[in-house]
Amino acid sequence: MQGKKVLIIEDDVNIASLERDYLEANGYDIEIQYNGAEGLKEALNNDYSCIIVDIMLPGMDGFEICRRIRKEKDVPLIIATAKKEEVDKIRGLGLGADDYIVKPFSPSELVARVTAHINRYERLLSKNCESTIDKNDVVEIGGLKIDKPARRVFLDEKEIILSNKEFDLLLFLASNPNVVFSRDQLFDRIWGVDSFGETSTVTVHINKLREKIEKDMSKPQYIETVWGAGYRFCQI
């Protein structure tokens, strides 16, 4: 765990200290920022293996921080919130967070989530580094082109910026055209058995993908909803 840095953006000194103590006990190097604007600056100017963001912060709220970070970096993001409303969880995930944790939470659960997301992210990077380019490394359907080794997506020759999970979800569906997958199946496949969360995460990411690749959200060309069953990628 040596050298893996985690940024905590949290205005409650006691909670931040507790998170720091448990993560440091598990070998992580911790940086804490208590102000939203300063936390964002720290996140953008330095490299971290994972960032934990509180929602209610002075200077800038956690939602805006997630949005701004995700525009520039693909680091694992976990939001921490005292709010239990579904809309807050969905909003955070929709802005690019990979996971959320509701206060009060078990510090050991936080450590488990941080470790799971970092490990998954590193596995993806390792797999990409070992890839060699051949005709099977590019998926092309209609005007959509998915470059697997580079983890880049193009729509009508224009690059579309996706988060890690959005890319994984799109690639999996596009690699299995015309097959219907339930939310549970997609959650297990993309988020994995060591992940935490709810299958509503799948719906959020499907909607974000549609916003980015569909010309008409009301009549999806690529990702189709099969009511009562799940989703499928249409072979155009």
Image (cartoon, grey):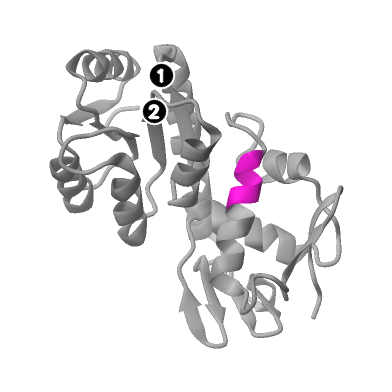
Q: Residue at x 27, y 16 (%)?
A: 15
Q: Which residue is mark 1?
A: 103
Tell me residue 36's x, y (percent).
19, 40
Q: Position of residue 176 (x, y in %)?
A: 80, 62
Q: Quadrant of the C terminus?
A: bottom right
The residue indicated by pointer 2 is 81
- The answer to whether one can see residue 163 in this image is yes
Q: What secondary structure is marked by label 1? A: loop
Stretch of the chain drawn in magenta: 200-204
**Whether residue 86 is situated above or below residue 173 in the rendered picture:** above
Q: Are marks 1 and 2 in contact (CB under 8 Å)?
A: yes
Per the image, label 2 sits on a secondary structure element best described as strand
Query: Which circle's residue, 1 or 2, is located before the other in the chain?
Result: 2
In-image side of 4 versus 114 (left or right):
left
- Callout 2 crowding tier (Cα within 10 Å): few <14, some 14–19, many ≥20: many
Q: Position of residue 83 (x, y in %)?
A: 43, 26
As for residue 65 lying within the magenta part, the answer is no
Q: Position of residue 201 (x, y in %)?
A: 60, 42
Is residue 203 on the magenta stretch?
A: yes
